[in-house]
Amino acid sequence: MCLLTVDAGRHYPGVVDEPLIRNQSGTARERPVDQPVEELELEAAIARNVRRLRQQEGLSVGDMAAKVGISKAMLSKIENAQTSCSLSTLARLSHGFDVSVTSLFRGADLERSAVFVKANEGSQIIREGSREGHEYELLGSLRGEHKRLECLLVTLTEKSVTQPLFQHPGTEFIYMLEGSMDYAHSRSVYRMRPGDALQLDGEGAHGPVELVELPCRFLSVIAFPDSAI
């Protein structure tokens, strides 16, 4: 792991001094403690819609800003959810894109699901291959139009002559919390200790092959593909 330390007040090549960090996964930004989260959601919705409309026009940020009648810097801030639009700016955007003002808010009222499970209150489930001494606690299953996520807390307290091997579509992430075990995936075996993580293709046969130090407790997060929903 490579750590980059940045001293306050100094500038380094490649380090951009902006409140917004963007990558392919989304955005991260500062929120004043007195600013409601709902307001940020509204800004994010406007940002998504304005960027989409501009791209549909096939125009650059500068060209679109000139067409709308605002500065390039302002349009850039709007697309990056770094500012709250005034009513006059919303009117300019609506006129410039030839859309209704309400269309700029599309998606702002979309319910984003979340699952909260208190400690020791997850549902106990039985998985194929379960046996005595193997506990699977469901910490939440988040389903959506294009995703399905299943989170399990697995506790293994007894050694057995045989161990289950699982195969399923999608990707699985395992994070070791307690104990140690040898965990197999396809033709490889990994010695896992607290803090170790393993991400694997679920189609390959996988599962614990040796419980080295009991109890073994680990998190298992499975992301199923669309076809498995």
Image (cartoon, grey):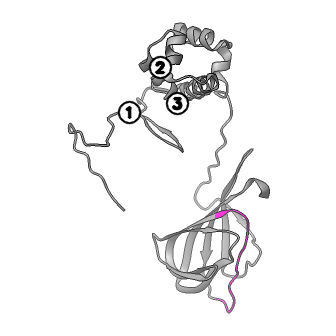
Q: Which mark is residue 62?
A: 2
Mark 3 to mark 1: distance in Å? Answer: 17 Å
Q: Which mark is residue 37?
A: 3
Q: With respect to residue 36, does 201 lie above or below?
A: below
Residue 136 figure quarter: bottom right
Left or right side of 26 for 21: left
The residue depicted at 60 percent of the width and 27 percent of the height is 55
Determine the secondary structure under disc 1. Answer: loop
Q: With respect to residue 149, does 6 lie above or below?
A: above
Q: Which mark is residue 19?
A: 1
Mark 3 to mark 2: distance in Å? Answer: 30 Å
Mark 1 to mark 2: distance in Å? Answer: 21 Å
x%, y% of residue 13?
A: 27, 43
x%, y% of residue 89?
A: 52, 11
Looking at the image, which is closer to me, 54 or 18? 54
User: Which amino acid, mark 1?
Assistant: Pro
Instruction: Residue 30: tell me if it is visible.
Output: yes
Magenta-drawn segment: 160-171
Q: Earlier in the sequence, mark 3 or mark 2?
A: 3
